[in-house]
Image (spheres, grey):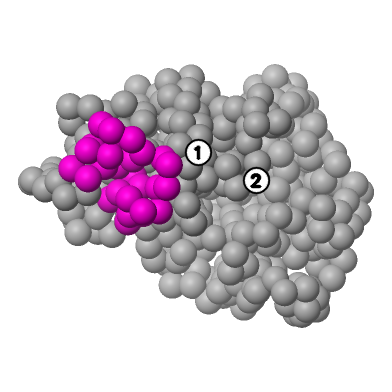
Amino acid sequence: MTITAAQINSASQALRSILRFDYPADSVLSRYFRDLRDELGARDRAFVAEAVYGVLRRKRTLERMCVPESSTRHLVLAWLARVEGTTLRQLGDGLHGRDTDFFTAVKGREMGELSLAESADMPDWLAERLLATLTPEQVLTLAQSLNRPAPLDLRVNPLKVERDVLIEQLKAEGIHCAAGRYSPLAIRLENKPALQKHPKFLDGSFEVQDEGSQLLGFLMQPKRGEMVVDFCAGAGGKTLLLGALMRNSGRLYAFDVSDKRLSKLKPRMARSGLSNIHPVVIASENDPRVKRLAGKIDRVLVDAPCSGLGTLRRNPDIKWRQSPEALAELTVKQAAILASAARLVKPGGRLVYATCSLLPEENEAIVAAFLAGNENFTQISAEEVLAKQGIVIACGEQLRLTPAAHDTDGFFAAVLERKAG
């Protein structure tokens, strides 16, 4: 496919806005496309998105290649030359004069010796944190998996359709897919078709959800008729899964501090056919509406606000936007949220703490500190909880998922139970 000068210009402009890191890359890109909806066709938008995310994934090595000329245009050209393997012939009218000289030079440029962080395309501080628990080789393997685009996973709504039936229906439409490796409700697609207007999406038969994220619902293992809380519900992807596993019975509270995020749950509830979900906007983890439920809840999910570093396949800008200072603030918030959520759990009830982070200070350290201060809680094996539901994954006491090992987003989860009596 020939790449045009206009496409390179558009990618450079979009990247310039994103690299200010004032807002998440996906929201900046969406606004850019809205502003230029009459000027950019579908093929142009696809190229711009691919180029922007490609540069964000490999920004550190690309900047090294471009020195001393690391403008956003040079970064896009370097990505084309070195990551995509694009030839001058494929660029058509895309290059002239100095651009042609730069493209030719960067294509054959020697990189020289790179640090581990440079080779992994991540900030120094992040590489250092990962080295606390991983070898340099493991860090590189993890980084390579994080620098690949994520596949597209669906979660079947068991109240509407069986997984095997939906797979056959999608295949009949020419959508190549297969059953997920771990989650009994997961379907993995070979490509990334637009599904927002698909009849089975509109009737609530499926939602888009990473397979790793789906496993958090099975760690909760909610039962019919129980009282359940999704403490940090966001837009409600996991809430919908919990409601379906409860077979639309009992009472499921979806708490979040953001009315905007929770508002996205309501149309999804309508599609899903679930009526047992009760969205509640709270002021903080200490909201009186939370305190009123103390000791009454069978199961509580805390999918805590976190660095999001496990989602770098989808959100590569996060590694450039996060910082050690922000991480320190997050860990304080995570500990406070877990402590507050734990008060809701009744004797014999279950508490699942989870993040989409790869860092021990957001995961194991939070759980260890909580257990040290709460003798009425004990940890149970995540592997055994999943195995009882026919999900075979060798994870031990705590669930740790990575794209390198499991081809899912990076997740951590611990299953805690309040002692009876």
CA distance for labels 1 and 2: 11 Å
List x then y, in percent, for residue 200. Answer: 84, 62
Position of residue 255 relative to residue 107, above or below, is above
Left or right: where 145 falls relative to 260 = left
Any magenta on residue 55?
no
Secondary structure of residue under mark 2:
helix
**Mark 2 sits on what residue?**
42
Q: Nearer the viewer, residue 404 or 348?
A: 404
Q: Residue at image x 85%, y 39%?
A: 266
Q: Residue at image x 72%, y 74%?
A: 174
Q: Residue at image x 70%, y 31%?
A: 38
**Mark 1 sits on what residue?**
7
Give the image quarter of residue 234: top right
Secondary structure of residue under mark 1:
helix
Please name the amino acid that badge 2 sits on.
Ala
Q: Which residues are drawn in magenta? A: 77-105
Please name the amino acid that badge 1 sits on.
Gln
Left or right: where 141 falls relative to 355 = left
